[in-house]
Image: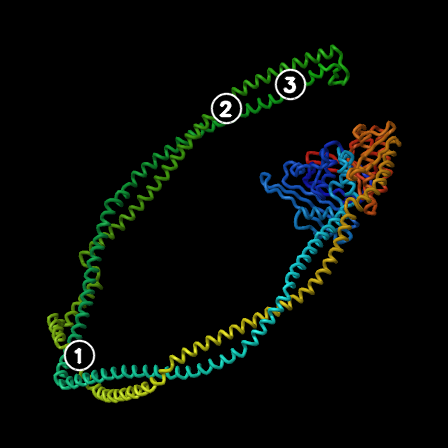
Amino acid sequence: MIPLKLSVKNFMCYRDDVPALHFDSIHVACLCGDNGHGKTALLDAITWALWGVARATPTGTGSINALRMADLMHMGQTDMSVELDFTASDQLYRVVRRHTVGVRGKNSRTTLELQIATDDGGETFRSISRNTVRETGIRISEILNMDFKTFVNTAYLAQGQADLFTTSTPTERKKCLAEVLDLSYYQRLSDDANTRSRSLRSDMQQALTAINLHSEETARKPEYEQRLAAVNAAIAETTPQAASQRKQVECLRAEVQRLQSLQTEFATLEQRVKSAQADARTLRQRVVADEGRADNYRKTIANAPQIVQGYDALQSAQSEIARLDTALSQKSSLDSRRAALAQAIALQEERISSTRRTLRQRISAELEPRANRLTQIKEQQEALLQRHATLAKQSGAVERQRKDAAGIDTSIRTLTQDNERLMAQMQDTRRKFDMLEQGDAICPLCNQPLGADGQQHLRAEYQRTGVESKAAYSENAIRIDALTNKGKRAAAEVAALEAKHNSSSRALAAEDANLKRDEQDSLQAQEDLAAARTALTDTERALKDKAFAQNERNELAGLETTIAALEYDAEAHQQVRKNVSELRQFDAAHHALNEAQANLPAVDEALHTTRQMLAERQADIEAANERMSALTQDLESLPSLTTALSAAVSQSEQLADELRRAEIERGVLESNISRCEDLEKQISALRQEHKRLARDKSIYDELTVAFGKNGIQALVIESAIPQLQDDANAILGRVTDNRMSLKLELDESTSERLEIRIGDELGTRDYLTFSGGEAFRINFALRIALSRLLARRSGAPLPVLFIDEGFGSQDRSGQERLTEAIQSIQDEFEKIIVITHIEQMKEAFPVRIEVRKSERGSTFAVV
């Protein structure tokens, strides 16, 4: 992984106005600045963007603790982000990690986006992120071919963690070395081979189970063949018996069907006789009814003269009653209109009378009093003008009081400014006086040292000036207090006078407006009074002369004439109604006469037809009874034949069932025998498959062991340890002038522990007995050796090396040796970034990234 560009926002000590850090032109650089200004935070930003971990610290068990997400965000902010462009395997990538905090710290959310460049210039990217943050993080580790722990054990000598590999447990060291050598690839092969072996074992078990099940089935084949022979013999015996029985059933069924047809005919004849008998009864009833109707029609026709005379009298009476009904209806309508007109005339007279009363009341109670107030209003307006003049004189007194209060405020401001000047003068005098007390005082005029007399003279002068200024300051303060109290009283008096003046002014304005409104009202009342008196005179004249409702009066006179012309007599009307009631019986009699004259010929014709139909029904009944007597003799043998047919059918069905069951059983047996033959072939194939699976499982078992920890992985580690040891000793000898060396050993018992033995001119000692400077050199040598081993694994130059502090534990000679060591290995790395705050170390690097801190947060500049 080679970083190219880093952009941060609100990350740790950095805010949102930090420039991007470009690594593309940097080979070896020093990241410098004061402690706490944010040097290590830039490397934390890289690890947080890639793995979501920052400022990792080792624990006693060799595991890693990391800062909480809340500790990474700049104080007071609600979001942070880091964007990193880097290359891996000659491909340009971009990773962006963001974290936001919700209201009151709830609903925090982290997003991670991985992008790949789509052009050579790195101008456009497309997303290759997975579904979740965790899955995307796994994808990043796959691209880098390392996780965070491998990174801090090889390429990153973190602040205070240079001994992370050395102080880890031997088991943790072995695990770290395995990750550097990418032995996880062989472990994945071992796991895959083991998984395949388990799958083959399951397939073998399934094959054995199938063989056992199929063998149980094929063992019954002789039983199936023996039973099939018996079934074939039974079918051969039963088949002719069933055919003979079916023929007998067909003969009996034909005879029974013939007799059943005759039985159906008998039932039909029986039903026909019943229907003919019912028709005969109906026809007899119809003959009786028609004979009665014909007799009634003849009697009605015999009384025709009396019926016609009575009906004519009824028609005459009904015409007269219709005329009288019309006259009554017209008279009722005219009477209603006459009453409405009389009511309308009375309403208009009452309305005019009400208007006269209203006018009289308004003139006496309202208009005359309002019109008579005009003289009184004029007198009140004259008095109001005199009160306005008095108020204008009071306004001048208020203005004089206001000017006096303003003068007091001006005096207070002048005295306050004078006191501020005196306070500054006293402070300056005090400062000069204190300078005289410090020893070798300087003359403020000539800038020459003052002698004892000069100092005494100035001291007395400063004391006098200070006393005078303080006295003047106190006198001004007393005057300010007095003027302030006086100003408050004056302001209160002005406010009271203004309030009284404003209240009086508002009262006069309101009274003036009321008088003007009353004056206008009185003038308007005089005009309204004249109009009301004229209206009252017109109203009284109309009532006296009846000069209203002329149209209604004329229409009422016309109605009286029309009603008289109707000549309606209520008694005559009642007598005509009585006559109509007495003659109404002739209306029904006349209708019956017309019906009898019209229907009598048709009734006689229908009576003749009905008598003929009755004779035909009697003949049909006699013929049907004769046929039914003949059928009764043939149907006597039907019950015995039906019983015989049922017995024959039952026996035939029994034989057919036996034959059908035998044929079904034969089919099942033949199918079972055929299945046994197929299973015998499958058993042979399964045994061959079981042998093949066993052979493949043996191969995968061997591969599981070969690719496991005790196979190829152990051989790779054993071959890598001497090279790692030689590289570390070469660097350690360079930085210690060949005074120290180390030895890496695998535990002979388990090969799961990697021990470190360190020796110097005094012999082999434990790592913890070496000083801080010596320990850092040991750690430095091991880290560089691990980085070289990591490069050999990938077959490419070492990508990047970060060294965070550690130089403070070295003396000047040690610092120079470490610097020389870094310079000697710089060609082996794409980039080397060294973090330090030691001034003399900065000059040894061609490029410096200087970090500084301000009120807006930290920032940096490349020099």
Task: Name the residue type under label 2.
Answer: Gly
Q: Is residue 379 above or below residue 128?
A: above
For residue 556, side relative to residue 634 (left or right) = left
Q: Which residue is the extreme one toward the top?
A: 453
> Badge 2 is on which residue?
487
Q: CA distance from mark 3 to mark 2?
A: 29 Å
> Badge 2: few (under 14), some or many (20 or more) residues near its Cα, within 10 Å?
some
Colour setup of the view: rainbow
Q: Are marks 1 and 2 in contact (CB under 8 Å)?
A: no
User: Looking at the image, which residue is at 75% across and 17% down?
Assistant: 442
Residue 666: x %, y % from top left: 59, 71
Q: Give percent across and percent down for residue 760.
A: 86, 29
Instruction: Judge whether 625 appears above or below 352 on screen.
Output: below
* Label placed on residue 426: 3
Of mark 1 and mark 2, the one earlier in the sequence is 2
Residue type of the residue flagged with mark 3: Met
User: Which sits earlier in the primary sequence, circle 3 or circle 2?
Assistant: 3
Is 403 displayed left or right of 720 in the figure? left
Marks 1 and 3, how far apart at CA: 145 Å
Classify residue 164 by image quadrant.
Answer: top right
Q: Is residue 814 visible?
A: yes
Residue lying at 21% horizontally and 63% vertically, measured from the top left = 552
Q: What residue is pinned by disc 1?
A: 588
Towards the viewer: 640 or 312: 640
Q: Amino acid at mark 1?
A: Ala
Can residue 850 be seen here? no
Residue 66 is labelled as none
